[in-house]
Amino acid sequence: FVSLSARPLGYKGMVTTLQLEPFYPDLQDERFASELAVVHSRYSTNTFPSWRLAQPLRMLAHNGEINTVNGNRNWMRARQSQLESELIGDIRPLLPICTDGASDSASFDEVLELLTLTGRSLPHAIMMMVPEAYEKQVGLDPDLRAFYDYHAIQMEPWDGPAALIFTDGTLVGATLDRNGLRPGRWTETTDGLVVIGSETGVLDFEPERIKRRGRLRPGRMFLVDTAQRRIIEDDEIKRDLATMQPWQEWLDAGRVRLAELPEREHIVHPIASITRRQRTFGYTEEEVRILLTPMGQKGAEPLGAMGSDTPVAVLSDRPRLLFDYFTQQFAQVTNPPLDSIREEVVTSLSLGIGPERNLLDWGPSHTRTVTLDFPVIDNDELAKIQHIDTAVPGRSSVTIRGLYRVEAGHKGMQKRIAQMCSEVDQAIEDGAEYIVLSDRDSNKDLAPIPSLLMVAAIHHHLIRRETRMKVGLVVEAGDVREVHHVATLLGYGASAVNPYLAMETVEYLVRAGYITGVSPEKAVKNLIYALGKGVLKIMSKMGISTVSSYAGAQVFEAVGLSQEFVDAYFTGTETKLGGVGLDVIAAENRARHAYAYPEDEAERAHERLWTGGEYQWRRDGSPHLFNPETVFRLQHSTRTRRYDVFREYTKLVDDQASELKTLRGLFRLRTGVRRPVPIDEVEPVSAIVKRFSTGAMSYGSISKEAHETLAIAMNRIGGKSNTGEGGEDVDRLLDPERRSAIKQVASGRFGVTSLYLTEADDIQIKLAQGAKPGEGGQLPPTKVYPWVARTRHATAGVGLISPPPHHDI
């Protein structure tokens, strides 16, 4: 066995379920008896079987994924210097609490065990680590809400789809994640046996033996006390914990709501100042027009169709922001994304900033925090934090500038980051509880360090020093103007983001008449709302419900950054390809700075900002794979049926791909390494093409002509085309020449009818849309033409959104 506990025994084997009992003789002995048994049978989904990833089975068996585990581990490491407990004594031999390289289940188990060994009951620890979605519950008991609010200050939720079985040898219980994304069924028999499993019918019982049965529910705990020989109901568990301590009294003693702090004077900046700083941070006319104007006007993130055909950041010959080198991971395999619209009740964008005390203790001193309703704050709210000492005596905030001498290049940037780390250390030693990292006040000689680099460097420095929990990190960033920018800053440790220049820009757009019908104050509120809601959508793609769990979770992958650079400043981030380092990041920064401060001011007299061209092709903008030259040849070749012109089109695209526009364009076929296979030994072309299958692009996302052409081509060669999620017109459905063989059923069920399904050769069910941007599969209103709406059984001109998951599967 694999347990040294005096209460539960653990048995493990890299065997099938039926092989476990023959492998351990004592499990075959009829004299061997136990009051409880927890069994976990694991099969590999996205990892290879290994002992290292086996379930811990010390206090926990877990089915699912903890999506925030990287952040949870980082926060636990940061807490280690503060951990003290009279019950354990010297805690140093137990460090690190979370074993390096262990599974998410093992890390959860280690923290759960620590909490129970230091005085918390097992239900208390579970409700602290996996709280229910209490934030938006109406009618929740105030004492229970205070319990959750208090513990939210002590620890971020371990978030993700999970069914948990936990035991200390006497108590045994089960619960689900806050969204109930993993199943659990229970049965109680008349003779006192309780069975809980992922499915009903794990054991067969005669109907007359069943006393009651049910299913686990999110936020509800099922608990059995074998010593008292009874089931402890969820209400009793929560009532006992809610009244255990004066949680609300402790909250009132220390917690401060940002909205309740005294208002600060609002400062309006002149257009010349705004323009100079926009140039410094690489703003383009396109970003102002396409991104900021709609967000300030409508309070919604702008929509765009299709992907980007411009070079990725590392291959671009234009200076790109550091944000562009990161891409968020997405929920995959058995890990469903959330529906941020229909499941909004289980999500939360509120969080607290400030110091956290010893996790193993509790009391009123643990509530010295400022709570925010949104992770994005305006300039006046930032001023409240910077001057918190005047409103709440005894609390202090320090602002540290991220500016370096631009002529010193990457060495100057590196030196300044090291100095900032030392300044933060000194501020913490002097008692600061709130650190504001700012890139304001740049000038001709001093350039701003990229805000993401500042935040990640300081965050990981403090984690290594084990002082991260002593302060809240707020970033005052001029380079932030997209949802992705806010998400990366939060993901790498910021507690709140102030995109001051984006806000000053939308204020100017109102005053200049580009945004109409709203006041400057309302435009700023709209921008904040759009950025916050955008972060919620991004979190949902990873199956994360709360921004407090998302903060520091690092659910990103670097594309085109060197391992050395990532290890130094973005520790723990995956960078499969390698790439550039601090020297290139500093060079791109210098290029933006030179544009803002040219040697000859007359050079920039003809343009206010760079044109852009990242989203739409412009002659002086970023290069695109699909530009007027390639699009003309494609259209001309198809209209005139000129194959020679089509070959010109494909050559142009292939040549551009190899000219550092795509990663795949960098690959070359290795020839001459192996002896070629004789052509008469391989299948003929006519047989190979029968296995061709088109991508599932829906009618509506692409035109009728394109959709039908793909179907006709596949039908003629014996391959299969896919309808995508937009349905299929009846006249095509019944036409052998134009029909698609594969009918897709997506979560929106657009165009899905009994006739549609019966006419399918294959039915493809798209279980989740975690890899897609936006809100699952989305067709903007401008693309829902009457003929598209008719096929989808929808209304013309009304946007269509498929939920990320199916709600009935």
Image (cartoon, grey):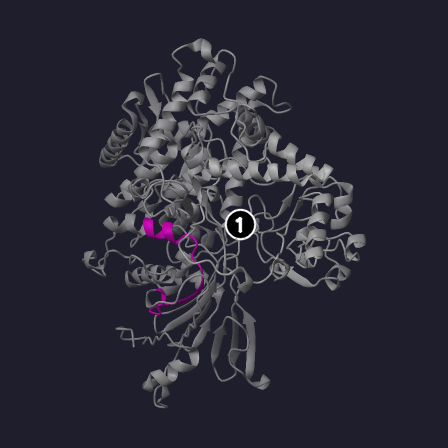
In screen coordinates, is 127 left or right of 793? left
Q: Position of residue 118 (x, y in %)?
A: 28, 60
Q: Amino acid at mark 1?
A: Ala
Report the magenta residues as a range.
Answer: 53-75
Q: Nearer the viewer, residue 625 or 149?
A: 625
In reply to whether residue 528 is colored magenta, the answer given is: no
* Between 294 and 470, the one nearer to me in the picture: 294
Instruction: Locate residue 773 relative to residue 748 in the image: left or right.
Output: left
Q: Is residue 316 above or below residue 758?
A: above
> Where's the N terminus, which quadrant?
bottom left
Residue at the (58%, 33%) spot, across then down:
299
Q: Position of residue 108 (x, y in %)?
A: 36, 60
Q: Is residue 607 above or below residue 471?
A: above
Residue tagged by mark 1?
Answer: 771
Residue at image position (43%, 35%) is: 315
Vertical relation: 31 (above or below) 355: below
Residue 587, image x and y in percent? 35, 27
Residue 520 at x, y = what percent?
56, 23
Label 1, secondary structure: give it: loop
* Residue farthest along the bottom direction in this orientation: 30
| Residue 304 visible to an observer of this rendering | no
Residue 64 part of the magenta-drawn span: yes
Neighbours of disc 1 within 10 Å: few (<14), some (14-19), many (20+)? some
Residue at 52% over, 37% down: 655
Q: Look at the image and tell me in which quarter the C terminus lies.
A: bottom right
Which quadrant holds residue 456?
top left
Where on the picture, by quarter, is residue 753? Answer: bottom right
Query: Observer-nearest residue: 55 or 85?
Result: 55
